[in-house]
Amino acid sequence: MDKKYSLGIDFGSLSGRSLLVEVETGLEVACVVSNYKHGFIEEKLPATGEVLPPDWTLQDPQDYLDVLAETIPEVLRQAKVSASDVIGIGVDFTACTVLPIRSDGTPLCFLPAYRSNKHAYVKKWKHHAAQDEANMLNKIADDRGEKFLLRYGGKISSEWLFPKLWQILNEAPEIYGAMDHFIEAGDWIVMQLTGCRVKSSCAAGYKAIWSKQEGYPSNEFFKALDPRFEHVVEEKLSYDVKPIGGKAGELTEEAAVLTGLLPGTAVAVGNVDAHVAVPAVGIQKPGQMLMIMGTSTCNILLSTNEINVPGICGVVEDGVLPGFVGYESGQSCVGDLFDWFVHHCVPAEYKQAAESREISIHQYLREKARLQRPGESGLLALDWWNGNRSVLVDVDLTGLLIGMTLATKPEEIYRALIEATAYGNREIIETFEQNEVVIDELYACGGIAAKDDFMMQIYADVTKRPIKISDSVQTVALGSAMFGAVAAGEAKGGYDTIFEAAQTMPHLKDIVYKPNPEASMVYDQLFAEYKILQDYFGRGENDVMKRLKKIKRVSRNHG
Amino acid sequence: MDKKYSLGIDFGSLSGRSLLVEVETGLEVACVVSNYKHGFIEEKLPATGEVLPPDWTLQDPQDYLDVLAETIPEVLRQAKVSASDVIGIGVDFTACTVLPIRSDGTPLCFLPAYRSNKHAYVKKWKHHAAQDEANMLNKIADDRGEKFLLRYGGKISSEWLFPKLWQILNEAPEIYGAMDHFIEAGDWIVMQLTGCRVKSSCAAGYKAIWSKQEGYPSNEFFKALDPRFEHVVEEKLSYDVKPIGGKAGELTEEAAVLTGLLPGTAVAVGNVDAHVAVPAVGIQKPGQMLMIMGTSTCNILLSTNEINVPGICGVVEDGVLPGFVGYESGQSCVGDLFDWFVHHCVPAEYKQAAESREISIHQYLREKARLQRPGESGLLALDWWNGNRSVLVDVDLTGLLIGMTLATKPEEIYRALIEATAYGNREIIETFEQNEVVIDELYACGGIAAKDDFMMQIYADVTKRPIKISDSVQTVALGSAMFGAVAAGEAKGGYDTIFEAAQTMPHLKDIVYKPNPEASMVYDQLFAEYKILQDYFGRGENDVMKRLKKIKRVSRNHG
């Protein structure tokens, strides 16, 4: 029998990619990336030149279709694989990326009547202009004692589906009226491929306040928000939620023409880009937490029963792997923090020295930071340059650095920032454990995990847990390919469950970062100090960070 | 009558200078600077090559004699002034700069028998190797309830005379035995000029635990330190303390040959470099605080009665101007903090932009920082990179920066550091006022005051007081020249009191920095936050800074 392949299509913030994987071995045969032509639409609406308000981030869904058309035929060509050997397709997308469509799947922004209306476009996760709606929603939910808040650490984010949809109702009721559905872009791609409108349990659970047991919030709740919003679920979300790990449908004739694949190819239920990585590192059971580390870090963890852990972004049954409860938590500023530092705080000599050796400034700083022993700098930081997602759930917190002397060097600050993100991670782990959700082992994937052994060792020393690293270049896309192989099923050369796929397809690096007990002993002391400062500045004892932000706002408005 | 002149000789840390001033008008006619040939002796003793222990800083007193020989004849030559028109000489020196001498004034290190003994040399103020002695002295003084501690904010510094002298007794008893006197370098210069051994009330009061009412600490106290130390005052300090503002003596034949001045020229009692600047800006009464601003800031303030203000470095009757009590307080890290920042935290683009415009990086940053409104950055700092001198008197405190986001820019941090030093200054002012020592007006001199209008405006806005600036290029040396004119007296063309000299000789810049009420309103809010953080981190509620220092020490020792 010929080798069989599965295709993982991963839609990120600014690009999409197709990864072709050998189903039996998990070998990554070829990968093709394509950037979105319109990128983020944040300043002006291209169709009209209209200036967009602050905090708006749109995209044009045509860019996603172009990814399908450009990367899939090309990845087949590069891999020299015949379409007949591709048995399944999996899709993942950044969550909270939502658009209004007609019942046939046409985005409203494709229609001439709505092309010039900014609310007809995709609202990206980082579209933060529905904050007023989110605040009101949280207040009303809290007043009404809505239980669902507990599943989301007590707060619904402005990034999520309902605040964005409510914003449309408030600001563009004509668009609200004209849409038949409001859909996650991942589900929309699956619809483009299969013709089937299927809502992924992952996106629904983590970003649309849905749960397997309770469904969506009640009509009474939505009515309390706005009488026009009472029947929002029936009117705008009237499609089935299907658990991830299942098959959404099969490739249509039309999609086959677009992609060069065969009609009838199995397509999996859509997934969220972070969550889909879990099986791709081989995680199949509780106790193993995955850290997807990049500009920010997303942590995913399985459990057998649903416990409401305070300060966690979300807990969803069937949200990550079928049959398990999946927890999502995260840190909103990791790689971004180190990038901020190298752009704003590194002296010219360092930059020149790095350039003359043709290494990156990050590498240069890490070489120097590596020579320090834990605790040697006397520095400590709170890693809240972009607020705190878990476990404080507070976007208004800001960064702190303490312990500087006239002898403090840039590489010491750099190391303190890395350590601070590790303390933030340990705080997440300890919060889980205090709520009887055990974490024995860590897995990591993403750019930082792949490249940065210095940082990973610090994470092992701080968290006092071994860390295993994905050996995939595109762990997320690999996860989607695995779900594609499961959608195909064993009879077609795939797998019947994601657990079977997870036995053979993932690959880990040989190295496992093991905690060094001597370093851990020092980090225990430093983490104790971090906790004291976290509680003091993050839990209301001294709200100076919020007051400084308020002074800042007033000062800017007076300018 | 010919114009009369007075000479101010100012000995700094690394150079000395002679300033010739017209007595009637205060006009600065000429100034000649000479660097010390040996600079700081910190690594090896030149005579033997012996490696010096950590925290040692010596000087060779020959360098001071060279300043006299090189700068005085040259300043007369440049000014085209005859020695016969120079009526008086004033001398000031960095305090805590002490040396062992024979009764004829010969430094022990000039004698072949002691030339190779490091304890025979000048110990500079920044010689910090007598910390053990200082700690022990403070502990015993505290145990015994010695009242003198109250005059010094509760703590004697390792920089001061007695710890250094005790260190000699402990480590080099042969030097202790061989010295007839242990003397401040300023008093030693006066002795070189006049042959008279006169201890200045200023140096004695601020740095040798002497007071006009109480004299030195008791023999019992010194005995409690070490039985051999019981009679230290009679044995090693047996010379009169004279109030500043008086005449120490007249120029000897020998000194006349050395300097080119006439024998018999009046020489004032020696002074300390910061304190002597007070009359040089025209301050003659309580309520006006002088800030001498450079790498660190020294604050001097007059009062009519002695109140023990907590956290103040020293309060001395006749210490600054005769008939007044003088308070000294200070901030240990001002210009040094901004220098640290530009050396370690400013990106290459900024450096290049400054270079291409041929301005200093400080100037470049200030141009950008000037465009910000108070409070606009959302940042706040505690200015403790080099500990806190006043009012917390704690060298183990360290720096703190709070409020950073991913949008924080270097110039915002830079401005936050400047503001932090201003808050530290305001805290000193408020501590005085809480203890009923009033401060209405601020005066400033030193490099920062002369050049930095941006920073001076922030100081005015934060302290909510007008600030007047010295117009002298060498305010300190001008002060010494004024005391020289007073030593000469009115009959010789000088003045009978320093108060009369202070009516005519000082000059202020035309500009007075006046507080901007709108800025002050914002700074009131920020200062309130500074106070909360100061008290939390500086008064024992959270000693994290000290604990981090301890972890740092342990970590370094394990390396």
Image (cartoon, coloured by chain):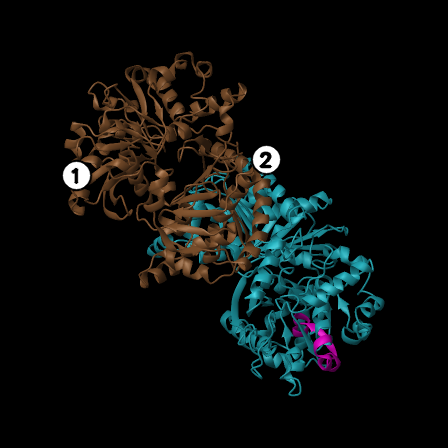
Chain colours: A cyan, B brown
In the figure, is residue A288 to the left or right of B368? right
Against B373, residue A406 (above or below) is above
Residue A399 place in picture, x, y as percent: 56, 52
In the figure, is residue A420 to the left or right of A180? left
Q: Mark 2, chain letter?
A: B
In the figure, is residue A119 to the left or right of B501? right
Front residue of B122/B440: it is B440
Q: Which residue is mark 2?
A: B540
Q: Quadrant of residue B480?
A: top left
Residue A541 place in picture, x, y as percent: 67, 46
What's the residue at 58%, 54% (across, down)?
A: A398
Front residue of B113/A43: it is B113
Sequence-wise first label, 1 or 2: 1
User: Mark 1, residues whose alpha carbon is within 10 Å: few (<14), some, or many (≥20)?
Assistant: some
In 3D space, how far apart are the residues under numbered discs 1 and 2 (Cα atoms)? 59 Å
Whether the magenta-drawn stretch holds residue A325 is answered as no
Residue type (three-letter) at the residue carrying disc 2: Gly
What's the residue at 75%, 66% (across, down)?
A: A242
Q: Are marks 1 and 2 in contact (CB under 8 Å)?
A: no
The magenta span reads A170-189
Q: Which residue is mark 1?
A: B83
Q: Is residue B189 visible?
A: yes
Q: Which mark is residue B136?
A: none
Against A239, residue B234 (above or below) is above
Q: Mark 1, chain letter?
A: B
